[in-house]
């Protein structure tokens, strides 16, 4: 499953501006905020990894993308489980980059839509015109019969 960067929305919309850039990208212009996108995944699928494509024209800012499972059945409040988390690197060459990470062995890595709500969270370390989220992908395998 792939998602364009422009599909992400600021978690805290107050004081955070989302600027559309190029074909499907966004950047954070003001404030500091995570950007989120709720994903719909096939029931029973096994999440294997995530990756995201970004542009860092300053070649030095960092960001991360996490796939988080929100457990709404946890007593006493919402429980979050990070299924996979990928971080950008300041040592990569060039300004167009991809960051990837394997999924955890956590039970939430097997999609259970009845229990979990899945969300991609992009976190730019610094809001800057130099850091652009182009898109993200969640990789999974389907159960065999």
Image: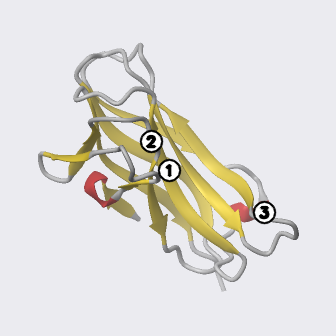
Circle nearer the viewer, 2 or 1: 2
Question: Gap in Å between the C-alphas at discs 2 and 3?
Answer: 28 Å
- From the viewer's perspective, tell me whether residue 134 is left or right of residue 8: left
Quadrant where the N terminus is found in the figure: bottom left
Q: Earlier in the sequence, mark 2 or mark 1?
A: 2
Which residue does the numbered mark 3 point to in the structure image?
107
Q: Name which quarter of the figure residue 59 lies in.
A: top left
Which mark, by number, is residue 121?
Answer: 1
Question: What is the count of numbered marks?
Answer: 3
Which residue does the numbered mark 2 point to in the structure image?
33
Q: Residue drawn at (48%, 39%), measured in percent from left and top?
A: 100
Quadrant where the C terminus is found in the figure: bottom right
Q: Earlier in the sequence, mark 1 or mark 3?
A: 3
- From the viewer's perspective, tell me whether residue 119 is left or right of residue 10: right
Question: Gap in Å between the C-alphas at discs 1 and 3?
Answer: 19 Å
Question: Gap in Å between the C-alphas at discs 2 and 1?
Answer: 10 Å
- From the viewer's perspective, tell me whether residue 105 is left or right of residue 22: right
Q: Name which quarter of the figure residue 70 lies in.
A: bottom right
Q: Is residue 138 above or below residue 89?
A: below
Please state the horizontal and vertical placement of residue 40, each as a whole percent of the image.
49, 74
Please state the horizontal and vertical placement of residue 14, each as a whole percent of the image.
39, 50
- From the viewer's perspective, tell me whether residue 25 is left or right of residue 103: left
Under circle 2, the secondary element is loop
Badge 2 density bin: few <14, some 14–19, many ≥20, Cα 10 Å: many
Q: Residue drawn at (28%, 45%), measured in percent from left and top?
A: 17
Which residue reaches farthest bottom?
145
Pick the front one: 28 or 66:
28
Q: Is residue 80 above or below residue 66?
A: below
Q: Earlier in the sequence, mark 2 or mark 3?
A: 2
Which residue reaches farthest left?
22
Q: Residue drawn at (45%, 22%), measured in percent from left and top?
A: 89
Which residue reaches farthest front?
14
């Amino acid at each position: 499953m792939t998602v364009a960067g422009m599909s992400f929305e600021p978690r805290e919309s107050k004081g955070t501006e989302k600027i559309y850039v190029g074909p499907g990208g966004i950047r954070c212009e003001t404030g500091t905020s995570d950007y989120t996108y709720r994903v719909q995944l096939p029931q029973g699928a096994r999440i294997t990894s995530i990756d995201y494509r970004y542009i860092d024209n300053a070649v030095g800012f960092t960001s991360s993308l996490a796939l988080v499972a929100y457990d709404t059945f946890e007593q006493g409040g919402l429980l979050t489980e990070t299924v996979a988390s990928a971080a950008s690197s300041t040592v990569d060459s060039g300004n167009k980059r991809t960051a990837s990470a394997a999924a955890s062995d956590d039970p939430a890595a097997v999609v259970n839509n009845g229990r979990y709500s899945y969300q991609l969270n992009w976190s730019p370390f610094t809001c800057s015109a130099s850091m652009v989220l182009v898109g993200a992908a969640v990789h999974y395998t389907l159960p065999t019969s």
